[in-house]
Image: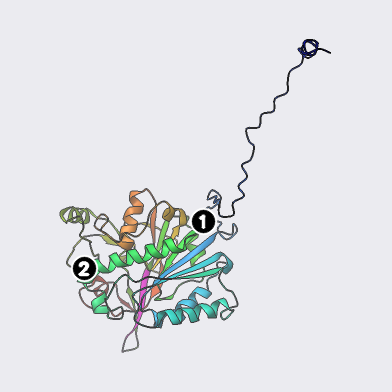
Amino acid sequence: MSHHEYSKWHAHQQTPVVFNHHAPVIVNATNVQKIDLNPIKSTVKAKENKERILILTPLRDAAPYLPKYFDLLSDLTYPHELIDLGFLVGDTTDDTLAILASEIDRIQNGGIHGLPFNSVKIVEKDFGVNLAQNDVTQRHSFAAQGPRRKAMGRARNYLLYSTLTPEHSWVYWRDVDIVDHPRQILEHFIAHDKDIIVPNIWFHRLQKDGRITEGKFDYNSWVESEKGLKLAASLPKDTILAEGYKEYDTGRDHMAKHGDWRFNKDVEMELDGIGGVSILVKADVHRSGINFPGYAFENQAETEGFAKMAKRAGYQVVGLPNYVVWHIDTEEKPGNAAADKGKRSI
């Protein structure tokens, strides 16, 4: 058959063409990793969905508080295999690091309830802070608040960015000097399905006559006021408002002045500033760039600046005035709002 006859014979047929617009790209390099954040959600069914929680605590001269801290942590009812722990140790002059390591070894090797946590990370970073952590007068003085809050903001951010992984759905910030709270605190907070949520912070004090005084501790959780906004507008942009001090009368409504642990724990209160003793945050809030400013953001820093930043970005910031987390009694000195208000003898 000639070429002419061959072409004529096949003229009535079409050459098949195969299109595959979805041919896979196969990457064999072992140093390339793909991360899909789409499945990572923060939902009210966190436990059923096996959502991971990252618990973060900055530490400085915290040695006396660590055994109690880990006792409380080990009592949490949220599945421990879904919890990762992160600590930042900085500017410490006592034996914080050694006791922290000892306590971690105790809980991770079945020392408490036999329920180790999924993982633990310890970050060391100094920021040049030289305020005496155990000197309440110095640490809570008005003059110390600006530098102290800036340093704390930086410490929180270093800890966050060193420990947050794609698997985490929630971040729970808690101070080391908490002395009591419900074992179901994580489940209770998650049930509210808020971007950021904080409880009320109180303390107990045993008086010489045997009476126990209940006191309101944290005046950094508040609702903004017109007076506060006007005051901020009159100050240089790099001035940090220290809430609860007579030097700056903001007229803000403090959550500490509301609520009672004897009432409905689920009552909510919208806030504009928050304290840092106990904060549950949906992890995507942090991933979206909402952190703890180590500088003046709308004349606030650290946790109060964090709340202001979150509100500016459209996130919910909610407090629970009747949900009380108990803090150590720091024997506040006159001049701080916590020293003079909100005490009750029982």
**Relative image position of residue 10 (x, y in whole percent):** 78, 14
> Is residue 202 in the magenta section?
yes
**Relative image position of residue 305 (x, y in whole percent):** 31, 58
Q: Which mark is residue 245?
A: 2
- Which residue is at 23% across, 72% downward? 336
* Location of residue 242 with respect to 176 vertically, above or below: above
Circle 2 — which element? loop
Q: Residue furthest left?
A: 234
Of pointers 2 and 1, the one earlier in the residue sequence: 1
Based on the displayed image, in which of its 4 quarters is residue 90 positioned?
Answer: bottom left
> Is residue 126 in the magenta section?
no
Nearer the viewer's eye, disc 2 or disc 1? 1
Query: In this image, 169 relative to 316: left or right?
Result: right
Residue underneath mark 1: 166
Q: Which residues are magenta?
A: 201-208
* Quadrant of the snapshot with the N terminus: top right
Q: Nearer the viewer, residue 336 or 35?
A: 35
**Relative image position of residue 306 (x, y in whole percent):** 34, 58
Based on the displayed image, in which of its 4 quarters is residue 245 positioned?
Answer: bottom left
**Relative image position of residue 209 (x, y in whole percent):** 31, 89
Q: Which three-letter amino acid code belongs to the residue tagged 1?
A: Pro
Circle 1 — which element? loop
